[in-house]
Image (cartoon, rainbow, N blue to C red):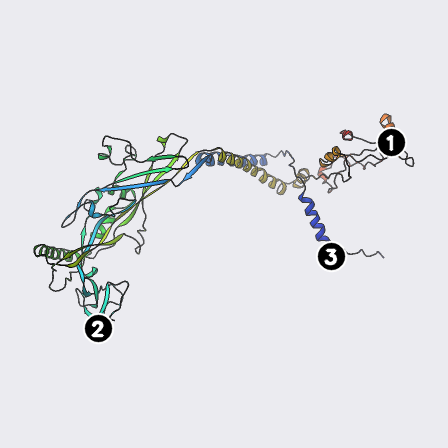
Amino acid sequence: MAATQPKPPAGATARRLARGCWSALWDYETPKVIVVRNRRLGVLYRAVQLLILLYFVWYVFIVQKSYQESETGPESSIITKVKGITTSERKVWDVEEYVKPPEGGSVFSIITRIEATQFQTQGTCPESIRVHNATCHSDADCVAGELDMLGNGLRTGRCVPYYQGPSKTCEVFGWCPVEDGASVSQFLGTMAPNFTILIKNSIHYPKFHFSKGNIADHTDGYLKRCTFHEASDLYCPIFKLGFIVEQAGESFAELAHKAGQAKAGGKKHYQHNLSRVALAELLTLATGTPHSSDTGHPAAPPSCPVGPSGGVIGVIINWDCDLDLPASECNPRYSFRRLDPKHVPASSGYNFRFAKYYKINGTTTRTLIKAYGIRIDVIVHGQAGKFSLIPTIINLATALTSIGVGSFLCDWILLTFMNKNKVYSHKKFDKVCAPSRPSGSWPLILARVLGQAPPQPAHCSEDRPPSPPSGQEGQQGAECGLAILPPRPCPISAPSKQMVDTPISEPVPQDSIPTDPKGLAQL
């Protein structure tokens, strides 16, 4: 009965695997060139290389200009100035009144319609019916001293009739009358499309010490008689408001006039409001005492029902400069688009409020104005690039490395899907082990590292006669018993039948005739 083989100790397999991984860590791999004469594989290989080459030449170097050092976000300054006059139903408006703020910065508003609540003083009046829980039936529905953050004042605890209609609301103490009950609408957009806007912009790229502006260097009054044209007057940054709105893809009538149009039945109220307020203003100027169109507290007629209006238009100035070219080739590019979401009713349109204060007979009075208009945002961005050696070398190295993707793809196809993939695998992968015999001579150590070291010679001995001599070499070998063997190959798996061309000869014994085809023993 065969003796049972002892089981390997626990952990021996893991240690053997760890030693194998540690040994493989210090192996050196070098590519082996094999020419495979396969037209389809060759066409695929060259096609992949061509696509990678076109990508880097056309897109990376020509389109993206990756050979340049770039800088984004230039330092920029913007100065704006609006000119023009317009009229409403009762007055003429100039720049000082319809442009807010007047400083001329990168963001400004042009008012196209207002809703004015005049002769507001500190007092008591009905709360707006639009305020939550403002409607009431009796005084019990109103809590004295209650302050609603979305309301117009401090509630007094009384339930009083609204400005018009049978409704009642809680009385509040604040600026009266409230806006919803006494506002009068005026449209300022009659001449607004002809307003001119001067946009002065200068940029600076500190990395390249490059500066430029968007105004032509003329001293003959060029800016007084020009308007912007992309082809003929690129350096005349004077735009008409109507041109900006049109280039943004919007209709000026919808952006400004829509808010000034009253709904059905609102025109009579508007004209009635206008005449009553105009009469009150004339009486105020004549007597110096504020008058209302009605007796008692200046409660006003109903306001004209209107829809939302206004919007935000962006003027984008782009400075993309190739500083390898002359400075005259670095030109601004203008684009226009609407920035606020016009299709979202909850956030479309643009309006703001401000007040004008004055005193009449010692009483502080104000006119509250809710303004609708077009807000202009001037936005500047750009990028400058100039040739630099470092990004050029980096991108060239990346391009040359990426061409190897074709070899990887074709090797994968060759070793996976081809009919003779096992033959190709044996041809492509080979393993050579260096001799393990120690030697103290540095030439032999170097030869062993290179895999070409011969074995050490055997010592002469009387008990072991030399091999039969063969010629002069045999005689020399017989004298000292020298036997030099070629390097022994590392055992590998047997090749496939397709690779076997000649029968494998028997291994040469160590005491056989010495051979040294490469003359390495002389080292």
Give residue 240's position: percent from left, percent from top: 24, 41
x 70%, y 50%: residue: 17
Give residue 516's position: percent from left, percent from top: 79, 30
- Check the image and report above or below for 19 versus 408: below
Q: Residue furthest front?
A: 362
Residues at marks 2 and 1 touching, judged by CB atoms closer than 8 Å: no
Q: CA distance from mark 2 to mark 1?
A: 133 Å
Q: CA distance from mark 3 to mark 2?
A: 93 Å
Which residue in the protein does label 1 denote?
A: 480
Q: What is the crowding at mark 3: few (fewer than 14 residues within 10 Å), some, or many (at least 20)? A: few
Q: Amino acid at mark 1?
A: Cys
x 41%, y 40%: residue: 72
For residue 220, which quarter of the picture? Answer: top left
Q: Secondary structure at mark 2?
A: helix
Say which mark, if any, is on residue 139: 2
Q: In this rendering, does residue 21 appear at all?
A: yes
Q: What is the crowding at mark 1: few (fewer than 14 residues within 10 Å), some, or many (at least 20)? A: some
Residues at marks 1 and 3 touching, judged by CB atoms closer than 8 Å: no
Q: Nearer the viewer, mark 3 or mark 2?
A: 2
* Chain-order first, disc 1 or disc 3: 3
Which residue in the protein does label 3 denote?
A: 10
Q: Amino acid at mark 2?
A: Asp
Q: What is the crowding at mark 2: few (fewer than 14 residues within 10 Å), some, or many (at least 20)? A: some
Is 230 situated left or right of 50 in this image? left
- Pick the quarter of the image with the C terminus: top right
- Pick the quarter of the image with the N terminus: bottom right
x 28%, y 63%: residue: 149
